[in-house]
Amino acid sequence: MPTIQQLQDFAQQVRRDIVRMVHHVQSGHPGGSLSSNEFLTVLFQEVMDYKLPFTMEGKGEDMFFLSNGHITPAYYSVLAHSGFFPVDELASFRILGSRLQGHPSSHDGLPGIRVASGSLGQGLSVALGTAQAKKIDGDDHLVYSLQGDGELQEGQNWEAIMYAASKKIDNIIATVDYNKAQIDGYTDDVVSLGDLKAKFLAFGWDVVEVLRGNDIASVLKGLKEAKTRTGNGKPVCVLLHTEMGHGVDFMMGTYKWHGKPPTDAQLEQALAQNPETLGDFTY
């Protein structure tokens, strides 16, 4: 079991990887990658029960589906440092012919990727179908998913949310990266989501709210609490209050870094704020 400090060191290395990957190809999405970093770190390093080497079927293990597929810089880094594929492969991010495309693709067999995603609003439906399949198979493991808050403006999510409660799919933990920002602005200005907790409760879900979604200890506590709520006839939502661009001061709290790469000088500034811990991959 990793310590809180070890998890913090892991997340710090992921931050370095995120800004280095996006800078190198001058393309990608640092803001949401940074806001979801601590969640992915805790999920893969401590909470989720999975097996290596990776298999597509996922029988007898927990499974994860990334719905907001543009945050691959964080996802790929966490997968690599968790042993799914070599860390040095991160150097191929968004390069033509690479397995590490801008959005996850199952086409090239990258370990950890079970479904192409990033066409927003669809990931929860896939996760729910998988959770139902586990029930049919008598597999008592859990299914996890991550959604962006902006993608909850897509109607398919609310069909899925209604369906999950109706069918009592209680082996899923769906997390919302609630950073309150999206590509075109702040969610309240684009299409306000209102009271998300009240909405999920009204749709028949159980909700665990984590107010410090970029604090490792708080995320760990919240996900462990969510696990205790499964199996009780209701799907579980973790509402994770995060900060866009967390951990890089000039990116924090603004939607403007949703899909913007740093300059050379900005990269050095970001790296200075996040010294190397686990070891950088090489170009």
Image (tube, rainbow, N blue to C red):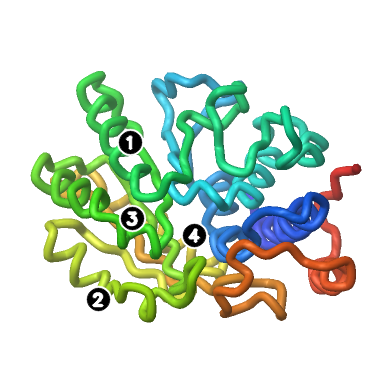
At a point 43% along the width and 59% down the height, the residue shown is 148
Task: Please rate how many residues cluster around mark 2, counting C-alpha atoms within 10 Å: few if below 14, some from 14 to 19, many from 20.
Answer: few
The reply, left or right, for residue 56 in relation to residue 257 is left
> In front of the other: label 2 or label 4?
2
Mark 4 element type: helix
Dots 3, 4 in contact, CB < 8 A: no
Horizontal side, residue 244 vs residue 200: left or right: right
Residue 226: give its label: 3
Label 2 vs 3, first from the N-terminus: 2
Q: Amino acid at mark 1?
A: Val
Q: CA distance from mark 2 to mark 1?
A: 25 Å
Q: CA distance from mark 3 to mark 1?
A: 20 Å
From the viewer's perspective, is 14 left or right of 208? right
* Quarter of the image with the C terminus in it: top right
Residue 220 disc label: 4
Q: Residue 195: which disc?
A: 2
Q: Position of residue 157 (x, y in %)?
A: 26, 51
Asked if the residues shown at circle 2 and circle 3 are in contact, with their CB atoms under 8 angstroms apart, the answer is: no
Q: Amino acid at mark 3?
A: Ala
Going 21% across and 46% down the picture, which residue do you hit? 160
The mark that comes first in sequence, 3 or 1, is 1
